[in-house]
Amino acid sequence: MIEYSNDTITAVITASGSAAIGVIRISGNEAISIVNSIFRGVNLEKQKSHTIHLGYIMDNDKILDEVLISLFKAPNSYTREDVIEISCHGSNYIIQNIFLLLIGKGARAAKPGEFTQRAYLNGRFDLAQAEAVADIIASESEAAHKIAMQQMRGGISKKLKTLRASLIEFAALIELELDFSEEDIEFADRTKFKNLLHQILQEVHLLAASFKVGNAIKKGIKLAIIGRPNAGKSSWINALMNDDIAIVSDIAGTTRDRIETTLDIKGILFRLVDTAGIRETNDTIEKIGVQRALETIESADFVLYLFDVCDLSETEVLQDMELIQNKTKAPILVIANKSDLIKDNTIQSNFNNISDILFLSSKDEQNIATAKEKIYDIVLQNYKFNNENVIISNNRHFEALKNAEKTINTILEELEAGISTDFIAQDIKSALRHLGEITGEIDVDKDILGTIFGKFCIGK
């Protein structure tokens, strides 16, 4: 059973440091009376919910600051408790003294995520929606924000509710059969049950499969820039970033270690990794860089392979491509770099056996725009990112879906083998439990709940 504390909690909910405004939140049964005891203005206990009041915070007879009090009465608040937010001037001295006044009057400092945990425990939203709050705060791109907002609005919760309702209906019929086991009566139509299980299995599989794109977008798509020395990798990362991130030199092997930065293309965050040139070398340090480049390929979500169109033949490019394809299944975009140096317009025909190849130069701004557009298009095509689809990005959800998928397959096998109904009933409960873990519809262990909300920032 999850313990719920109904004491009054408080926290500073704005970032530390000098700012124009600071906000302190307080929630609980005594929130209004505690704030009222240090506030000079209207009597907050007699005011309506969702109102704002101007007045002074008093430290005994001393005015500490002129503030705005935002009042939210239960159950119409974020936590479904009485909530007050004090907007004061952003001085650290003022903020900390107001916070200490609240503590002195009986509130206690909130733990990380405790406001959202109370909102969940009070039925404000389910566990999946609560976790989406943290994802919204942490989102670094438009795409990551959309996925988090979709979950916050109950996208996955609605789908799982429908799936669980159908399965619960058959679970009840199976349980009824157990009550009449001596009469050998079947209440659950086995054909309909199998069809339902296949339907649920397909839905669960699609949700689990969406984790690939959801996780990549949430963390940022890792784009490895790969090629031989002097292919122009550093020039390209500088051009894509419109900044001198990497050292550019005519000397081969300048880049010894990975250089990482982030780039937003049409709302999708990319983590660009510039790597050492791939080649055989006797230089100990460069050899380590080459090995790290190969490791980067293995962990990449997308590979941008560059080659010097003036230097390599199609055969050599295909050799490099084979090396990359043996290391990853990620999409690969090939850029024939330094195309501005080619005067022969027929050069493209020398690379007819290479698909997804662009003849570009990092010195041309239009080429950079073309490359970004192509990268974006390939991501949409390979990751099937669609704002309308329900996408999961949470590892806990993914594990629960995979467990549910495994259990449903077991039930189907049991039905085919004519296994006893009591075993089937237990596995149905197991599948329901795995699906329910995502939204918290089945008892969630206290330690798991603490881990989930402990990842939140203080004040949320």
Image (cartoon, helix red, strand yellow):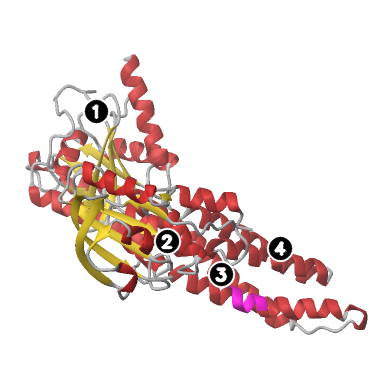
The residue under the point 33% across, 25% down is 289
Q: The residue tagged with tag 2: helix, strand or loop?
A: loop
Q: Which residue is mark 2?
A: 30
Q: The residue tagged with tag 4: helix, strand or loop?
A: helix
Q: The residue tagged with tag 3: helix, strand or loop?
A: helix
Is any part of residue 91 visible from this angle?
Answer: yes
Q: The residue tagged with tag 1: helix, strand or loop?
A: loop
> What range is drawn magenta here?
164-168
The nearer-to-camera label among 4 and 1 is 4
The amino acid type found where label 4 is placed reads Thr
Provide residue 357's location: percent of width, then percent of height. Answer: 25, 49
Per the rendering, the mark at residue 229 is 1
Dominant secondary structure of the residues highlighted in magenta in the image = helix
Per the rendering, the mark at residue 410 is 4
Q: Which residue is mark 3?
A: 202
Mark 1 burial class by Cα count in 10 Å: few <14, some 14-19, many 20+: many
Mark 3 burial class by Cα count in 10 Å: few <14, some 14-19, many 20+: few
The amino acid type found where label 3 is placed reads Gln
